């Protein structure tokens, strides 16, 4: 799959900027760049040391396109493991296009999505899980997702998997050796040590699998649905959380007829807030569709904020408690936060009365004023408390990739089969089959076992230029 041809792409974001970086990689990359580069000191790029910078101009025959700074990286000591050149030019889109078109005429071809990182993987500069972490790092938009991606790109996850695979491989070799001496009835693999290893592998796999529940929502943002009757302040609360006028606020009930979503980072964790249509009986066809969508969003959300207007709740608490119980019973596994809005309209005794009425439901209760932004920080802290960030603080490996999660589940299933076989005195040849399958699943994660289709699917999601 590895090609020796030279590829070129814009490495910085497309559009006009102060500077742009054009990346070239391949066996002839330095030679091609040298053919269009005129150094201010008449340097030949092919004769320069790796990791050096050179000032000059990009020229097309007699036409000067731009003054540039060229970085030279000689393989294998480069990101891709190949000869690589990065041309820092001025950020005009016209200049970018002219330089790329010139390089294409000189023998380069346009890079495919993620092809620079693919070459880094194929040349042994990164394993597959590290390569995937590059894409996660680029797309990280909060502290937590950035931390996870950096930990994975540095090889934390790979090292953990590689260590398990190596230990299992050693025992697999001994099991295979026993098969060669089947007639001698000898055991090279210590069964008690093997049992301890399987327990240890099983423990680590379960920990990694459990971490996916946290890792997946951190990577993609934790969806929080804001629900309630019309005109209780859902849109005002969304605006208060985001600190901007994102949603239309009106005294007219039913203003929000579709869901409005926006993201906010709280304590390094990304939350996706969803302002939904007010829940009520209505004959309005459009509003009815919006209410249907509200329940769909509750289904998709990780946390539900059920918002009530304080004075109405004081009068109709028994009716509202029934509604809260309905949502709680319909979605028993979702954290449900009852939010009483317009706190400033209640006395201390009335607040205590509402607390007492809701205490039997055993749920989280927050009082606030969205309009005056009183209690909004308490709500943010409560949302943050729902996220188990202990693993982040301890710098433990957290799984965020669905492909990795799937392979870990399959590996755990195979390890369980091996463990059962060991405890049942199953023959070595049958155990060896399950061990091989577990090793295969470990190899899929790091790329020790791979195929063109798998690589194509992974790198198709990368941006061009990376």
Image (spheres, grey):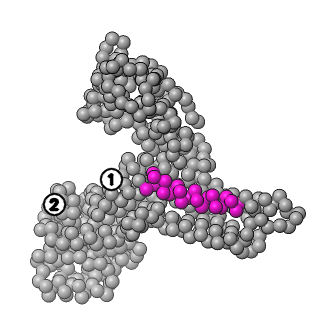
Is 79 on the left or on the right of 382, as rendered?
A: right
* x and y percentages locating residue 242 in the rendered image: 21, 59
Labels 1 and 2: the sequence-earlier one: 1
Q: Is residue 386 visible?
A: yes
99 versus 240 height, above or below: above
The residue depicted at 58 percent of the width and 36 percent of the height is 1
Which residue is the site of mark 2?
249
At horizontal 60% and vertical 49% (from top left) the residue drawn is 448
Q: Between 460 and 60, which is closer to the camera in this rendering?
A: 60
- Quarter of the picture holding the C terminus: top left
Magenta residues (range): 151-172
Q: Residue furthest right?
A: 183
Q: Nearer the viewer, mark 1 or mark 2?
A: 1
Q: Quadrant of residue 306?
A: bottom left
Horizontal side, residue 124 vs residue 466: left or right: right
Report the front residue among 400 and 247. 400
Left of 355 or right of it: where is 24? right
Rendered image: mark on residue 141: 1
Q: Secondary structure at mark 2?
A: loop
- Residue 422 painted magenta: no
Residue 180 rendering spot, x and y as whole percentages: 83, 58
């Amino acid at each position: 799959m590895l090609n020796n041809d030279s590829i070129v792409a814009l490495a910085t974001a497309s559009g006009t900027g102060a500077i742009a970086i054009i990346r070239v990689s391949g066996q002839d990359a330095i030679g091609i760049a040298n053919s269009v580069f005129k150094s201010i000191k008449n340097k030949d790029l092919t004769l320069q040391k790796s990791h050096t910078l050179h000032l000059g101009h990009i020229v097309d025959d007699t036409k000067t396109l731009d003054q540039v700074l060229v970085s030279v990286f000689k393989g294998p000591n480069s990101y891709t493991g190949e000869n690589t050149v990065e041309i820092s030019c001025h950020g005009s889109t016209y200049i970018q296009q002219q330089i790329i078109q010139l390089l294409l005429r000189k023998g380069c071809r346009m890079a495919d999505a993620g092809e620079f990182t693919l070459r880094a993987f194929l040349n042994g500069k990164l394993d597959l899980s590290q390569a995937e972490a590059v894409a996660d790092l680029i797309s990280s938009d909060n502290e937590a997702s950035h931390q996870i991606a950096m930990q994975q790109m540095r090889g934390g996850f790979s090292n953990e998997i590689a260590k398990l695979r190596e230990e299992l491989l050693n025992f697999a070799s001994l099991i295979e050796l026993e098969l060669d001496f089947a007639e001698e009835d000898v055991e090279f693999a210590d069964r008690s040590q093997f049992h301890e290893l399987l327990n240890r592998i099983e423990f680590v796999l379960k920990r990694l699998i459990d971490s996916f529940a946290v890792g997946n929502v951190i990577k993609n943002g934790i969806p929080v649905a804001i629900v309630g009757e019309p005109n209780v302040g859902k849109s005002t609360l969304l605006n208060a959380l985001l600190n901007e006028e994102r949603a239309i606020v009106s005294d007219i009930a039913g203003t929000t007829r579709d869901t409005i979503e926006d993201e906010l980072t709280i304590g390094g964790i990304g939350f996706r807030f969803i302002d939904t249509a007010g829940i009520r009986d209505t004959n309005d066809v459009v509003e009815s569709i919006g209410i249907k969508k509200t329940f769909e969003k509750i289904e998709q959300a990780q946390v539900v904020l059920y918002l009530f207007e304080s004075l109405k709740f004081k009068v109709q608490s028994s009716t509202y408690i029934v509604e809260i119980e309905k949502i709680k019973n319909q979605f028993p596994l979702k954290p449900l936060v009852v939010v009483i809005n317009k706190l400033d309209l209640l006395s201390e005794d009335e607040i205590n009365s509402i607390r007492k009425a809701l205490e039997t439901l055993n749920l989280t209760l927050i009082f606030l004023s969205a309009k005056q932004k009183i209690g909004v920080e308490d709500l943010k802290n409560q949302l943050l408390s729902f996220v188990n960030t202990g693993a982040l603080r301890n710098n433990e490996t957290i799984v965020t990739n669905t492909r990795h999660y799937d392979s870990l589940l399959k590996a755990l299933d195979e390890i369980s089969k091996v463990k059962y076989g060991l405890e049942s005195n199953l023959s070595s040849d049958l155990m060896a089959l399950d061990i091989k399958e577990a090793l295969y699943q470990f190899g899929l994660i790091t790329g020790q076992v791979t195929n063109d289709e798998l690589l194509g699917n992974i790198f198709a999601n990368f941006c061009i230029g990376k």
